[in-house]
Amino acid sequence: MPEFLHPLSREEKVAVTGLSPAVYRAMIAQRHAGYTSVTSVNLDTSSKFDIGSLLLKLDVADLERLAASLELTLQADKAAASDMKKAEELYKEAIKINPFDAVAAMSCGVVLAQQGDVKEGLKWLERAHDLASSNARITKNLAAVKSYL
């Protein structure tokens, strides 16, 4: 079995993470229908990548993993309002499926810190920052958690 998101660079792997589940489902449907090209999908105007072209390089199994990971992250976001431990478990499960999801790693770190495990939360936030150092939200949360040490 090839490496997850194999044909992409590390930076490209981060770029294709966290899109709308509808984007992944549409791309999967297009791949099943035999399409070999796609209209540009650039939902993030700050991205230097043509996301549609990157998604086309992926096989259906990778697209399904991206969708599954995002679904878990969305469930974790909802759970965080009432059950931090459940949110932590869901974020970790999402990251296990897609280790390039910087936002899920950040969210896991924040949840851990809010539960009182600041050192473990900091590790997850540093991981997120390593993946997406230009993400202002990650940088802000990392600085906030560091201030508690």
Image: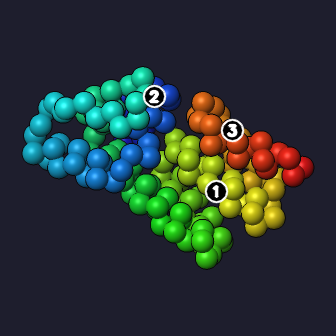
Q: Is residue 39 left or right of residue 2?
A: left
**Does dot 2 land on a helix, a strand or a loop?**
loop
Residue 79: tell me if it is visible: yes
Between discs 3 and 1, the one toward the N terminus: 1
**Does dot 1 land on a helix, a strand or a loop?**
helix
* Quadrant where the N terminus is found in the figure: top left
Q: Is 7 drawn above or below residue 16 in the view shown?
A: above
Q: What residue is pinned by disc 1? A: 108
Judge the density around disc 1: few (<14), some (14-19), many (≥20) Cα neighbours within 10 Å. Answer: many
Judge the density around disc 3: few (<14), some (14-19), many (≥20) Cα neighbours within 10 Å. Answer: some
Which amino acid, by three-letter code, is at mark 1? Cys
Q: What residue is pinned by disc 3? A: 139
Which amino acid, by three-letter code, is at mark 2? Ser
Q: Residue 46 carries which label?
A: 2
149 or 30, which is in the foreground? Answer: 149
Closer to viewer: mark 2 or mark 1: 2
